[in-house]
Amino acid sequence: MLPAPISTVAPSLATGRPISWGVVATGSIAQRVVEDLALLEDAVLQAVSSRSEASARTFAEKFGFAAAYSDVGETLGYERLLADPAVEVVYVATPHAQHYAVALAALKAGKHVLCEKPLAMDAVQARELADLARDKGLFLMEAVWTRFLPSFCRALEILRSGEIGEPRWLQANLGFVPAYDPKARIWDPAAGGGALLDLAIYPLTWALGVFGEPGSMLASGVITPEGVDLQNSLALSYPSGAYAQVITSIGAECPSVVTVGGSEGWLRSSAPLFNPAELTIQPRSGTLRTEKFEASGHGFIYELREVTRCLQAGLTQSPFMTPEESVGTMELLDEARRQMGLRYPSDPQTPIAADHLADTPAPHTALRA
C-alpha cells in the first residue's frame, strides 16, 4: 500500500525558496493546472511555449509568465523554452504522443520534469526517461494528481488503520461518452487515443495504492475500426488472494467510483474517483459514516506542492510517485494492450500472436518475478 504525502494542509503556503517554472503547451489541461500553480506562494511563472505565437503570448499574458516562446523557423517553441536558463522545472502538458520527446529534451537540457500522464506511450520510453533522470540527477514525476489529494490520502489512511479489516477486493470504473470526432485526440490512435491511456491510470491508481503490484492480469477490450479501445477491463490478481477489477470506457457513462471490500467492512468513494469529495465507510460492526473533503484550487495544487517541496529539498524523485512506479504502470498498460491486440502507430512493427487478439481470451500473465 502506498504511503501518503506528509501533509495536504494549506498547499499554497511557501515551503522554501522560489521555484521557476516553464510550461510546454497551452491547452485546457495546462490552463487548469497553471491556475493552481499560480496559487503557490513560492512558484515563479517564468515561461510558456506553444507552436503558435498567438497562443503562447495570450497564455503568458493571462497568467503573468515572464516569457512566451513559439516556433521560429526550424526551432520548436519548447526547444526555445528549454534554452531559457531561468527555467528550473518544466511541466509537460502536450498530448500523450508528445510526452516522451518533450520530457526527453527537457532532461537533456538539464531541466527537472513534471509530465502529464501517461509518462510515455510505452514502458520502453518510460524506462529511458527514468534512467536518464537518474543518471543526470534530475527530478522526474508523472502528474498523477489523484495520489496527492486529501481524499485519496485519507482513504489509504483508513485502509491502513484496519477499520474495515484486511482489504481483499476492489472494483473501480471510469467512463464517459465524448462526441465522436476522428480528428480529436481521444479518437486518434496516433495520439494514444482511447480509454486505456486516457482513463485507466485513475482506477489503477486506486488498485495499486491499495494492493500494490499485481501478480497477474487478465485484460480484455473492444477496439474500434479506427484502432482505439472503446472500453476495457483489467482483472488484477495478487499473491495474497486479493483481487481488483478496473473498467474504463469512452463508449458508456459509468458511475466512476471505487469500492474497496475488506474482511470487516467496505469503503467507497464518491464520483469522480479521480477527485472524490466524499468517502463512505461501513465497518461491519460500526455505523455507516461519510467523510467530506474540499480540495484547494482544482486539486492539482497538491502535486505541484509536492514537486516544489522535493526540489527545495534537493530530491530527484517524490517518495509518493516515483519514476519506477510510472514504469511499472506502463508495463501493466503494455501488457493490457498486448492481450487486447491494441496497437499504436508508434509501436514497433512486430506481429501480435493470434491468441492475444481482442476477441480471444488470453491467459493470466505473470508481470514480473
Image (tube, rainbow, N blue to C red):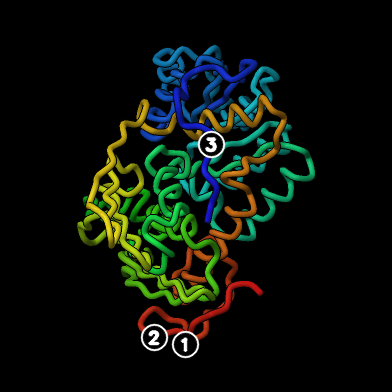
Considering depth in this image, is 337 or 95 the residue closer to the camera?
A: 337
Q: Looking at numbered disc 2 in the image, what kind of residue is underneath it?
A: Thr
Crowding near pointer 1: few (<14 within 10 Å), some, many (20+)?
A: some
| Residue 302 spot, x, y in % from top left | 47, 32
> What residue is shown with label 2?
360
Tag 1, which secondary structure?
helix
Which is nearer the N-term, disc 3 or disc 2?
Answer: 3
Q: Are marks 3 and 1 in contact (CB under 8 Å)?
A: no
> What residue is shown with label 3?
92
Tag 3, which secondary structure?
strand
Give the residue displayed 31% in from the left and 31% down from the top: 294
Q: Looking at numbered disc 3 in the image, what kind of residue is underneath it?
A: Val
Q: Looking at numbered disc 1 in the image, what kind of residue is underneath it?
A: Asp
- Alpha carbon of mark 3 to alpha carbon of mark 1: how far? 37 Å
* Quarter-of-image position of residue 133: top right
Give the residue displayed 34% in from the left and 42% down from the top: 275
* Quarter-of-image position of residue 283: bottom left
Which is nearer the N-term, disc 1 or disc 2?
Answer: 1
Give the residue displayed 25% in from the left and 48% down from the top: 271
> What residue is shown with label 1?
355
| Residue 242 spot, x, y in % from top left | 45, 72
Give the residue displayed 47% in from the left and 82% down from the top: 356
Considering depth in this image, is 320 or 113 the residue closer to the camera?
A: 320
Q: Residue furthest toward the front?
A: 285
Considering depth in this image, is 134 or 259 the residue closer to the camera?
A: 259
Crowding near pointer 3: few (<14 within 10 Å), some, many (20+)?
A: many
Considering depth in this image, is 213 or 136 the residue closer to the camera?
A: 213
Query: Quick check: can you spot residue 344?
Result: yes
